[in-house]
Image (cartoon, coloured by chain):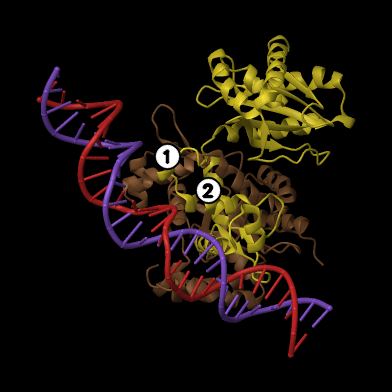
Chain colours: A brown, B yellow, C red, D purple
DNA sequence: AACCAAGTTCCGCAATGCGGAACAAGTTAA
DNA sequence: TTAACTTGTTCCGCATTGCGGAACTTGGTT
């Protein structure tokens, strides 16, 4: 970031650091000490102390009475739900996704692109297994997952082209190989109408994905996934993938 | 805030301003211009420009290509879902709440306290009506709603006492009256085992609430609500309230 | 072409945030 | 009890960082 000394006049460091503190919290962690925050962010403790004081006053952090450790505050939740509220498709997709998860015994997710990642807007875990621990807001790479590849493959060619440099930048030397694999997946998608990843991104996880283009909304994608030991390729291709396509049809009627 | 000139050495203004920009977005609004942000936050436009530049670089804002207006970015979503992940009760309550909403044709919510507000952790709208437009992260006052009063009434006396000054500070001169009404509601709760608000907080909305104390978690409360025109007091008291109590029992087995 | 509205950039100033170090408070060990 | 340690808060002088008015683009309208 120090490269571009020009633009940096515009960059507000204190704000960035404060957000770094918030982002230091990982799902499942209850509370972090000031020191732990300092370690994670690489900031000196007095700086962290000031930032956490400020964030606490604003409700973005909350301090545990006993330990004095910090938790993310509920003000953060309000921001997050404002984001979700702007994607009204969740209202429609949610119930149908739950129905799918129940009937097929699979986890299902809806995601859209952010940079070179896919971000989950909604997920329904299969009731059977605790399955994969991904939730709303989680990120998975676009180029190497079933949902990302389905997203990519279903995009207009012009959009696909625009993504190439972004992905190339992300993967550096590996891009050549990944790019070839992505193109392969694109071909598969055109032929089959869905994309598949059988243990490729996460070993022991099988997934299929379809692109979802709803008129008013940005492009999205759906996937269905589950643990490899409980599934087999045949069922994924012959039962799950078609069911996912059927669901897509209900969300985005053709025409 | 300027009163305490001492502590203010610790307060990081730039961070607070940046968060003010994020908080300027309201649910349902798609994109805001820099100028609109300046108006809402009361900051000069050059300042807003720098802040939104910074937030955009970090992924907390995203810029609409065509209009140049800003939307909340998906990084915000990641923060928000980290908060939700720390309340594991949602995993258990969610399905049961949906079931309730379906069977009773009512909206149902789970909330906990933040300051003198109750904040929704989970809500399920009734499938029938679009009903009340409150979602995860929304706030309603503690002292004047069914859910808030149920929360209060079910608290240990010591905790109730601790809340008094907080509420008094919030309501100022009105506190006398509100306090009396709250005490009345507390008595009702002890007698009936639920609290009720029939058009009191929002005209045309009827609601009942129960306290929910789950061992590992902070105190919470549940409510069921719906439009007044479709409901009547008898049904609320004789059907909905008991059903809510039954649900509470499944979430927090006695003992 | 002239005008207006919105946004970005400039630039000198000083207020603001910085961070090392001293200070407090709480914990463990000896 | 004292001493060493660990964590968190506060101090305080310095210079960096962010500030914001004004000038400058950019783009759309009459």
Give SS at disc 1: helix
Left or right of B26? Residue B50 is left
Q: Is residue A39 visible?
A: yes
Tell me the residue at 65%/31% (across/down).
Answer: B110
Residue B242 on image: x %, y %: 75, 18
- Indicate which disc residue B79 carries: 2
Residue situated in front as seen by the camera: A16 or B147: A16
- Give residue C3's quadrant in the image: bottom right
Q: Residues within 10 Å of mark 2 (few under 14, many from 20)?
A: many
Output the chain of dot 2: B
Residue drawn 46% across the image and 64% down it = A11
Residue B171: give x, y in percent of width and height: 66, 27
Q: Answer above or below: position of B72 versus B246.
A: below
**The C terminus of chain A lies in quadrant:** bottom right
Is B9 left, or right, of A162 in this rendering? left
Would you name the residue on which mark 1 appears? Answer: B7
| Nearest the eye: A91 or A97 | A91
Q: Which residue shows up at 58% across the image and 48% down it? A: A136
The numbered mark, 1 or 2, whose residue comes first in the sequence reads 1
């Amino acid at each position: 970031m120090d490269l571009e000394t020009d633009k940096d006049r515009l960059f507000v460091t204190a704000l960035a650091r404060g957000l770094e503190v918030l982002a230091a919290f990982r799902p499942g962690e209850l509370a972090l000490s000031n020191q732990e925050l300092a370690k994670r962010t690489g900031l000196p403790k007095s700086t962290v102390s000031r930032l956490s004081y400020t964030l606490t006053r604003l409700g973005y952090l909350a301090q545990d009475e006993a330990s004095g450790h910090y938790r993310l505050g509920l003000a953060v939740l309000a921001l997050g739900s404002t984001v979700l509220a702007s994607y009204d498709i969740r209202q429609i997709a949610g119930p149908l996704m739950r129905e799918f998860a129940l009937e097929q015994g699979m986890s299902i997710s809806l995601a859209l692109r952010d940079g070179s990642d896919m971000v989950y807007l909604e997920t329904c875990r299969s009731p059977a297994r605790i399955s994969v621990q991904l939730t709303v807001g989680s990120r998975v790479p676009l180029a190497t997952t079933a949902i990302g590849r389905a997203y990519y493959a279903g995009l207009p060619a012009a959009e696909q082209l625009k993504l190439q440099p972004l992905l190339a930048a992300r993967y550096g030397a590996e891009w050549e190989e990944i790019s070839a694999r992505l193109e392969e997946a694109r071909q598969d998608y055109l032929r089959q109408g869905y994309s598949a990843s059988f243990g490729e991104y996460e070993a022991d996880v099988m997934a299929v994905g379809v692109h979802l283009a709803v008129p008013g909304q940005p492009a999205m994608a759906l996937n269905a996934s589950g643990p490899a030991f409980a599934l087999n390729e045949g069922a994924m291709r012959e039962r799950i993938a078609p069911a996912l396509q059927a669901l897509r049809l209900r969300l985005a009627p053709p025409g």
